[in-house]
Amino acid sequence: MKRIAFHDREREIKEIMNILDSEPSLITFVYGPINSGKTTLISHLIKELPDEYAPFYVNLRGRFIVDYEDFLNVLFEIDEISGVNNVTEYSKSILKDLGAVSGIPIPINLFEQIFEKKDKSKDMFKYIEQFFMQISKTRTPILIIDELQVVGDLKIDGLLMYKLFNFFIRLTKELHLCHVFGVSSDSLFIEKVYSEAMLDGRCRYLLVDDFDSVTAAVFLEEHGFTEAEKAVAWEYCGGKPVNLIEMIYADNRERIAKDMLKTRITQLKDLLDYLDYTKPRIMIGDDEYMVEKEDIVDILNRFVDTEYIDDKGLNRPAKHLLIKDNILFFDPHTGVIKLQSRMNLLAIQEVMKDEKN
């Protein structure tokens, strides 16, 4: 089986290592277009970290979370060990064998105690803080929550997200105890995070974007692409890693690129056809808005002659729908809106020609 090796990302790795080399003080939000390689970057970094760090990685992707019980089951890695009565005792017992784990280790009896509490969040945060306090005596804890937006709208006695943010602030800015990374491809979520007053001066943002042309060319050359094949790959896929990898596995690389574009064109046409028959509803804050086809077309038309636009004058419900459907990517840090992929750009330019004719 052909395996794709991790490629480049030297800038992002250097930036993250600079963060880890300093005292924990800010929450780091890692964001970028869908399938740009954020999780791959984090996974690679975890494997390469020196022993002085203790990473705890939680991936919420594909998890069905509707209440605290669900969240607890994802957040913690339950240890069936018995007879452990306190966090200090447990932390000391596992520290020497602690590697990268998919969750925060907890003995089953302590987990059940939290599970049975009425105010689960209070005891959950108390356990994590005490656990990290013990770990930090010999190693630097790193908490990474991937696909953080999954719990963005979860409400139990208020939004869980705000409780998490407050706790993250305590771990970083107040206690300087643990590095915290929140990872997300959802730019609506990142926009919401960016506007939160409670996070002002308490977080930083790290963009993991698609490859630039030079990086993409080197990546493809490592996998035997000719100059002509590299040109085709960039024309159809740009620097989107997932699309480039699909071309690497293909027998006929130009054909697979054209097939991917045909599929994207069909999907976009289907969306516009769908809007002829119904008006989707989008929640913005606590209010619901209908999305009009003409507003969608207006936004898409702006990409016929350019790859980037700004937020000025865009219909917000239409913009939110296009971001939600992974057609647009909005970077709140720069205010720039672009397509999620080169494939989307080509599809839109093709479909908009048909709409005008």
Image (cartoon, grey):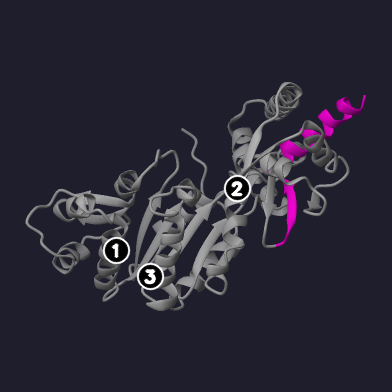
Q: Which residue is mark 2?
A: 36
| Residue at the image position 50 percent from the left and 49 percent from the top | 149
Q: Which residue is mark 1?
A: 128
Please tell me whether residue 356 belongs to the stretch shown in magenta.
yes
Can residue 74 be seen by looking at this rendering? yes
Residue 193's spot in the image, x, y percent?
57, 59
| Residue at the image position 61 percent from the left and 50 percent from the top | 188
Left or right of residue 197, residue 138 in this image: left
Disc 2 and disc 1: Cα gap in Å?
A: 31 Å
Going from the N terminus, do you reach mark 2 or mark 1 first?
2
Left or right of residue 52, residue 278 in this image: right
Disc sitting over residue 266 in the figure? none
Q: Amino acid at mark 2?
A: Ser
Q: Nearer the viewer, residue 264 or 51?
A: 264
| Residue at the image position 66 percent from the left and 45 percent from the top | 221
Residue 60's spot in the image, x, y percent?
42, 46
Going from the N terminus, do you reach mark 2 or mark 3 first?
2
Q: What span is in magenta?
A: 334-357
Q: Which residue is mark 3?
A: 178
Tag nearer the camera, 2 or 1: 1
Disc 1 and disc 3: Cα gap in Å?
A: 10 Å
Q: Nearer the viewer, residue 31 or 67?
A: 67
Q: Amino acid at mark 1?
A: Ile
